[in-house]
């Protein structure tokens, strides 16, 4: 990934990148508005003031909202109209969204409003930015959005502290919104015409969850290919399945990249069979979980890259309603979350497949009938029975994979009418995004389990441990007098050593959950990368 961003400038006509979003959401990088941004925001606000002065009937400015679009509002009630919109729409339930998601929401709302089509006052936009820079993070419940008209409910919760309402985190404490703003020395505001609708009408919640998910998915994909490479070595697999020419013949770009990663990760390994080694196999091909890594991972790679493109465009989109264009307020549907909903469902499916095939590789390593000579459940020689080894690691991985199969059912195929049938098709985009994020977490845990299992198998291979007296049906055979394989690929050796720095080999049973957590944390912190991605 690109270098770290310590400062982000919002301009009306330049792209906000995924790396910049991560810097703000997770590393509290500061954000400022470019002078050009201030100019277009002020010009857009002038258009709104002109409409008010001329007494035009404009949705959400001089009318009610949703099915109340035909109810005209007295100009003297403007403040109450906008305040009521935010307060009445803050109906979220469930656990609070993570703070990095809420910070990403705030940044994306600033980006959307800064492009000069929303009619918000510059002073209001700057207050939202001040909250972000001073680390006042609103409490936003995770549930309550239909994904059209955008994320009305979560965005309303996000705005409440700006009005001295709701709750927010500040200085490590959970406070009521008014107190949090006072401690951060930020003045609360009263909303003017159009501002409530500008602030809570858009796709920033689903997009924030999606942006963090695709960033983490790209990291996890690279880790999954390192994990697959280590498992291939642990099972004495065949590297010829990743020959460059056969993958060129398929013409799928992700598959070609994944095959190249497998060759790169295992380069120099003596654990693998290839056409140039002295190892002689009666097994002429590997099972699909090994042989088809490039085809399966490559398809997920293509899907993740596609979803990343959707999310990056949505990060820079203007998604509220109505939009101020050529001194006109045009009611459209840019708030509809369908692009993100479909993409998030696709992301969840693509990630679930990484866990599906990972668990099958893990199963082969702990199954003495499939492991090419390893001990049952990777116990030390002669200790199986007294010790259960990695038996339950496979159970846990299977449970997560099965949960993902339920979560991968698409949310976007559903719709339910709301607002007296005025909003009669909704996207469920935020539900799709939340499900994809949960799938991502499950997949990360499965990959951590596979890495631990593969490292254990490598330790047993290097010790020359076989099945502890059980009948050996098939083992790889080297020339007489040749040493057992000891050299992993240059990349997989680095990964193996990093794991062993945190987690020792398990030659006697112990509680394994902390080991899984340690490896999962290493994945999240990107500590297992051995290439510059």
Image (cartoon, rainbow, N blue to C red):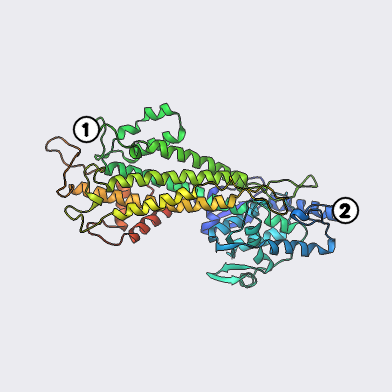
Graded by Cα atoms within 10 Å as few (under 14), some (14 to 19) or many (20 or more), the crowding at tag 1 reads few
Instruction: Mark 1 and mark 2 in contact? Answer it, CB < 8 Å.
Output: no
Rendered location of residue 28, percent (x, y) = 54, 59
SS for callout 2: loop
Graded by Cα atoms within 10 Å as few (under 14), some (14 to 19) or many (20 or more), the crowding at tag 2 reads few
Label 1: which residue?
A: 282
For residue 325, what is the image quadrant?
top right
Q: Is residue 506 above or below residue 163?
A: above
Q: Nearer the viewer, residue 135 or 511?
A: 511
Viewport quadrant of the C terminus: top left
Could you tell me how far apart the alpha carbons at marks 1 and 2 are, in whole angstroms?
86 Å
Please give the name of the residue rendered at 33% of the width and 42% of the height, measured from the top-left corner. 229
SS for callout 1: loop
Furthest-right residue in this view: 54
Furthest-left residue in this view: 481
- Say which label, 1 or 2, has the lower sequence index: 2
Please give the name of the residue rendered at 28% of the width and 38% of the height, measured from the top-left corner. 237
Rendered location of residue 360, percent (x, y) = 35, 44
Query: Can the viewer see residue 160 in this picture?
Result: yes
Q: Is 480 positioned to the left or the right of 284 in the image? A: left
Q: Is residue 477 above or below residue 201?
A: above
Rendered location of residue 313, percent (x, y) = 60, 44
Rendered location of residue 394, percent (x, y) = 33, 51
Label 2: which residue?
A: 54
Between circles 1 and 2, the one closer to the viewer is: 1
Q: Is 287 positioned to the left or the right of 192 in the image? A: left
Q: Nearer the viewer, residue 506 or 131?
A: 506
């Amino acid at each position: 990934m690109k270098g770290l961003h310590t400062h982000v400038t919002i301009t009306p006509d330049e792209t906000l990148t995924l790396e910049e979003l991560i810097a703000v959401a997770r590393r509290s990088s500061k954000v400022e508005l470019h002078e050009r941004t201030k100019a277009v925001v002020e010009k857009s606000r002038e258009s709104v003031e002109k409409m008010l002065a001329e007494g035009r009937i404009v949705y959400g400015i001089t009318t009610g909202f949703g099915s109340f679009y035909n109810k005209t509002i007295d100009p003297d009630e403007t403040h109450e109209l906008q305040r009521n919109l935010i307060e009445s729409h803050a109906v979220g339930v469930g656990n609070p969204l993570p703070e990095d998601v809420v910070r990403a929401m705030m940044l994306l709302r600033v980006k959307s409003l800064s492009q000069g089509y929303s009619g918000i006052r510059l002073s209001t936009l700057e207050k939202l930015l001040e909250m972000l820079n001073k680390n006042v993070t609103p409490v936003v419940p995770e549930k309550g959005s239909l994904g059209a008209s955008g994320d009305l409910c979560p965005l309303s919760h996000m705005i409440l502290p700006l009005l001295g309402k709701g709750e927010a985190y500040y200085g490590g404490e959970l406070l009521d919104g008014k107190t949090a703003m006072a401690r951060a020395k930020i003045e609360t505001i009263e909303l003017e015409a159009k501002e409530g609708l500008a602030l809570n009408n858009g796709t920033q919640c689903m997009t924030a969850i999606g942006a963090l998910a695709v960033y983490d998915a790209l990291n996890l994909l690279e880790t999954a290919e390192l994990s697959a490479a280590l498992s291939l070595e642990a099972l004495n697999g065949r590297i010829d399945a990743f020959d460059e020419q056969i993958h060129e013949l398929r013409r799928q770009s992700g598959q070609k990249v994944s095959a190249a990663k497998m060759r790169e990760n295992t380069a120099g390994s003596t654990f693998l069979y290839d056409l140039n080694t002295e190892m002689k196999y009666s097994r002429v091909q590997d099972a699909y979980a090994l042989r088809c890594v490039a085809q399966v991972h490559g398809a997920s790679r293509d899907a993740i890259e596609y979803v990343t493109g959707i999310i990056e465009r949505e990060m820079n989109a203007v998604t509220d309603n109505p939009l101020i264009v050529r001194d006109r307020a045009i009611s459209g549907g840019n708030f509809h979350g369908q692009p993100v909903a479909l993409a998030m469902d696709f992301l969840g499916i693509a990630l679930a497949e990484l866990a599906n095939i990972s668990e099958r590789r893990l199963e082969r390593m702990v199954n003495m009938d499939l492991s090419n000579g390893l001990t049952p459940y990777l116990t030390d020689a002669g200790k199986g029975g007294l010790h259960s080894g990695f038996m339950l690691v496979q159970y846990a991985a299977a449970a997560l994979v099965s949960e993902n199969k339920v979560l991968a059912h698409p949310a976007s195929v559903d719709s339910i009418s709301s607002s007296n049938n005025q909003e009669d098709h909704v996207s469920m985009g935020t539900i799709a995004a939340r499900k994809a994020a949960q799938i991502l977490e499950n997949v990360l845990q499965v990959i951590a389990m596979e890495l631990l299992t593969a490292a254990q198998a490598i330790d047993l291979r290097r010790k020359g441990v076989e099945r502890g007296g059980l009948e050996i049906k098939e083992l790889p055979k080297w020339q007489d007098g040749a040493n057992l394989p000891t050299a992993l690929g240059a990349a997989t050796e680095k990964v193996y050593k990093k794991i062993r720095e945190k987690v020792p080999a398990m030659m006697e049973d112990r509680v394994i959950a902390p080991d899984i957590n340690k490896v999962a944390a290493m994945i999240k912190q990107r500590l297992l990368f051995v290439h510059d991605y």
